Amino acid sequence: MAEWLKRPTHNWRILNNTAKHLYKTPIPSTRKETVDRQVKSNPRNNLIHGWHHCGKGRNSRGIITARHRGGGHKRLYRKIDFRRNQKDISGRIVTIEYDPNRNAYICLIHHGDGEKRYILHPRGAIIGDTIVSGTKVPISMGNALPLTDMPLGTAMHNIEITRGRGGQLARAAGVVAKLIAKEGKSATLMNYDIRQGLKNKAAAATTSSEVGEAVASGGGGRRLHAVAALGL
């Protein structure tokens, strides 16, 4: 047997004291590949359900109107808490997980009353951090509060368009909106040509973390089968 086949293929080297690990292997498919060991894929059964993709780019007559749709790996939909309506109940980040239905990571929150929910993962938040939602909560990473309680210049994501409906703006990975003006009962956001009601809620001082940020892929197979490799 060739000598290089006897070498271990999963030797790790930690990058800059972070959760990013670097493969040390001569195999082309994993050479110079990095993985984020903090991110898991272990969805809770009561927070997921099946998702049937219908249409596959076809209209009501069955004619293809959007090309290159269909196929792909099966996915399970994660129920994300976009409303953040657990007022004044602190929660702890337990896991950071991959979601195949969006380009941002999600994290599992264990609230003080025993309820468990998924939210969009704020960039920079780590396992063990505490977040809270309410009207008089501090302006810190991951906390959710109305726009009326945020100072000008606050960076935020997951912003409501209609009060109580849940966040609909700035939900993609790396997207951030900034509060630049308040006038009467409305607020103006940078990066969005829209005026929001001051009572609408948003997650403060953060953006959504990006899937694959600073993570290198060793080969095309990992990119092609990324959903299957993460165990759905």
Image: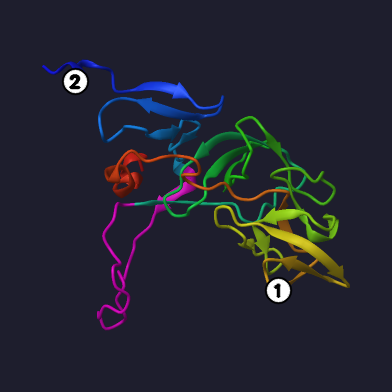
Q: Which residue is drawn at 74% across and 41% down?
A: 89
**Looking at the picture, does residue 99 appear above or below residue 11?**
below
- Tell me the residue that label 1 is attached to: 194
The local crowd at label 1, few if under 14, some if 14 to 19, many if 20 or more residues have their Cα within 10 Å, is: few
Magenta segment's dominant SS is loop
**SS label for mark 1:** loop
Q: In this view, does 10 lie above or below 169?
A: above
Look at label 1 and name its amino acid. Answer: Ile
SS for dot 2 = helix
The picture places residue 162, in percent across and down from the top left corner, at 69, 69
Residue at figure coordinates x 68%, y 64% from the top left:
160
Report the magenta residues as a range.
Answer: 46-74
Question: In the image, what residue type sits under mark 2?
Answer: Leu
Kindly identify the residue that appears in the image at 25 percent across and 29 percent down.
Answer: 27
Q: Name the residue under label 2.
A: 5
Q: Residue furthest right?
A: 184
